[in-house]
Image (cartoon, helix red, strand yellow):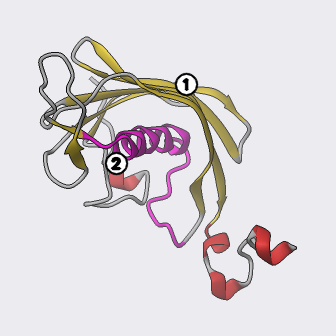
Amino acid sequence: MTTTPPITSVIPHRPPALLVDRVVTVEPGRRLVAHRTAAAGPGFHPGPAHPGRDGDPSLALGLLLESWAQAAVLLACWERPNPDVLRGNVALLAGVRDVRALAPVAAGALLVHEVRVVRDLGDTVLTTGTTVVGDRTVLEVGQLTLALRPAAVLDPAAGTTAKTTDERS
């Protein structure tokens, strides 16, 4: 059995914003499986009635996707960890497409995220994957693109942040 380092030694996310509980399997540069227990509380909202669910609260799609995206960041940064968002390269969401929410997620559900690398261009990583609860796929991500950029791009005082579209016009 391979021992994995603590998640917080690979990425800068910290509770309560950290939405991955543990890494179960990792094939660096190829594939990662991570778990998250969907804890009840903020982020759950009354959902539409589904057979056998009667409108019970469901995890918000934004939180489900964020949890999966953090698993993608873990895979992208596994061999180039950076637990400090103020130094080194940070992973920024560059794009996401073809996301499908297939079923509601109840409080207490164990999310099993599987992330695969489609292509690693060094400073840009394209990923794809799914989230499963029990035997049911609840989320499909066609592609999520991460841009690994120097932390200085996040510092407005450094004058290196990208300008908004309005500022460029």
* Residue 130 in sight here: yes
Q: Give the residue furthest to the right.
A: 169
**SS under mark 1:** loop
Label 1 – label 2 distance at C-alpha: 18 Å
Reply yes or no: does residue 81 show up in magenta.
yes
Relative image position of residue 139 (x, y in whole percent): 40, 26
Q: Position of residue 137 (x, y in %)?
A: 35, 17
The image position of residue 145, as x and y in percent, is: 63, 40
Q: Label 2 belongs to which residue?
A: 7
- Quarter of the image containing the C terminus? bottom right
| Res 54 → quadrant | top left
**Which of the pair 55/131 is nearer the observer?**
55
Residue at 34% across, 55% down: 8
Does residue 46 appear left or right of residue 120 in this picture? left
**Given the image, on which type of amino acid does mark 1 rest?**
Arg
Question: Looking at the rendering, in which quadrant would you find the N terminus?
Answer: top left
Task: Name the kind of residue labelled 2 in the image.
Answer: Ile
Q: Is residue 99 above or below residue 154?
A: above
Q: Residue at x 50, y 51 (%)?
A: 81
Secondary structure at numbered mark 2: helix
Asked whether, in this view, residue 142 is left or right of residue 57, the answer is right
Q: Residue at x 69, y 84 (%)?
A: 158
The residue at the far bottom in this view is: 157
38 w.r.t. 133: above or below = below
Q: Which mark is residue 30?
A: 1
Mark 2 closeness class: few <14, some 14–19, many ≥20 residues within 10 Å = many
Front residue of 58 and 116:
58
Magenta residues: mostly which secondary structure?
A: helix
Instruction: Note whether residue 26 is visible.
Output: no
Residue drawn at (38%, 58%) of the image: 13
What stretch of residues is rendered in magenta? 59-86
